[in-house]
Each structure stands twice: as C-alpha cells, then as structure tokens.
Image: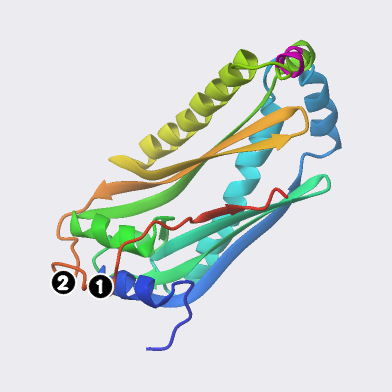
Amino acid sequence: MQFTTSSDGQELYCQIDAGYAPRKFVFGNIAYSIGLGGGLLGGLKSMARGEISEFSNTFNHTRHFALNRMVNQAKQVGANSVVGVQTLIMPFQACHEMIMMGTASHNPDLPPECTEDPVTSDLTCEEMWNVTRMGYMPLKLVMGTAVYSLGVIGGLMAKFKGLGRGEISELSSLIYDAREHALDIIRKEAEALGADDVLGIRTHIHELGNLIEFMAIGTAVKKHPGLTTKTDILPPQAIIRDKDTWVSNDD
C-alpha cells in the first residue's frame, strides 16, 4: 500500500483501524480580501454597533472554497473521505490566507454517494476511531463566521472602561451576539445535511482592528448502520490525547 498522509504513526493506526485506508495527503488554500467595495461599505457600517454582513459573507464564502479544493483533490484519487483535517489561517496586510490539510482516504463501509461527494472531518484520528466505534460517520466539516463591530460610541466606552477594573459589558455582549450567529450558521448547515449532531465544535475569536471576528468549526456526523472499527479496543500504544486541529497565526 503506497500513500501519503498528514497523520503521524499513532493517528495512522487509529485511522486504518476505523476503516479509513489512506490514499493521499491533500490540501486546499485560498487567499482572500474584503475588496474595495466591501471594505468601504463595511467601513461605514462599522461606525454602528452590530454585524458587518459584507465581511461575514466574504469570510464564510471564501473559506468554503478551501474546503472544496481539498475535496476535489480527494476525488481525483478515488477517495470517499478526507479525515484528520487541520486548518491554518495566516493574516497578512489587508488579506488572509486559509489552508486546510488532511488525508484523502477510502472507507468501503461508507454510502456509495460519498464517492462523488467525499465526507470531511476535523476530528483527530483518535476521536474518529471512537466515533466510528459508536456507529457514526462524518458528513462534513461545517464552519460559521460572524464579524461584528462595537461601533464608534461602543468602542470609546469600552476603551474608557478598560482603564478600570471589572467587566466590559459592551465587549461581552458583542462576543455573545457573534457567537450565537456563528453557531446558528453551523446549525443550519448541519440540518441541511441531515446530520444527527455536530461534534468537536471549536470557537476562535480574532481582532480585526475595531472589529471582532468569531468563527466556529466542527464536524457534522450521522448514525450509519453497520459502521464499526476493526478491533474492539485500541492498544495501549494508541493513547488518546488532546490535539489542536486548528492553528491561527495572528502574530
């Protein structure tokens, strides 16, 4: 068996035992900018408190491009899944670059339609083993981004309050609003897929000048009859450990 993979030795064992035979290391990337029109309109809207939909829509739309490019590479090698996906975002100047990396794999127990539309997951391979053991298959890596502004007045109030001690309520409420919006995007995407649940949701907050970007990402899963692992338990060598699958270089 000849293949390339993004997994280390421990992850590879878990991946193969869960039924996902690796075929090729695949990745998708995209560099994106708000653009002049979106920047001007978004800049004007940022003077008021609330979501800047121009920015949210751009980020949500372009980030799915990276996912689609990775999936297209997987299809070229006959894979029906991309597992162990890791995501990297690198902001530079007025642009951002998003890179997704994973292992294109083939699991014969997945439904036939997965050949044309491979499933994707950012669960670690150890987590994937556990999910498979419970009879669940990944459907898609789902993402939701919300960009909010405190507004001119809210920004000034937050700065003044930052000089003292205690909660800055304006910033707290803004993050709560952005979080609920991002999670709602994920919920709707998962419902459209017919998912039973979204696992491993991770949330990330990035500061964009006077704006706050809140992103949520997770794996939509669904119960699938007959899906299980090759062995009943993992050997001691395959120690389950927490591992980040999302890396953001903000510095």
| Magenta region, main secondary structure | helix
Q: Amino acid at mark 1?
A: Asp
Horizontal side of 11 relative to 50 (left or right) equals left
Q: Which residues are magenta?
A: 157-161
Residue 131 rendering spot, x and y as whole percentages: 26, 55
Q: Quadrant of residue 151?
A: top right
Mark drawn on residue 17: 1
145 up-or-down from 139: above or below: above
Q: Is residue 160 left or right of residue 57?
A: right
Give the side of residue 21 with respect to residue 179, left or right: left
Q: Is residue 204 magenta?
A: no
The quarter of the displayed image where residue 104 is located: bottom left
> At 39% from the left edge and 37% from the top edge, which residue is drawn?
192
- Quickly name the residue at label 2: 231
| Picture layout, residue 44 above or below residue 112 | above
Instruction: List the single residue furthest toward the bottom.
Output: 1
Residue visible at 44% across and 83% down in the picture: 3
> Gap between marks 1 and 2, in whole Å?
7 Å
SS label for mark 1 = helix
By what rule are the colours in the image chosen? Answer: rainbow
**Residue 41 at x, y = what percent?**
81, 25
Q: Residue at x 46, y 43 (%)?
A: 202
Circle 2: is it few (<14), some (14-19), or many (20+) Cα within 10 Å?
few
User: Which numbered disc, 1 or 2, marks the residue that appears first in the sequence?
Assistant: 1
Quadrant location, the N terminus:
bottom left
Counting from the top left corner in percent of width and height, residue 111 is at: 27, 60
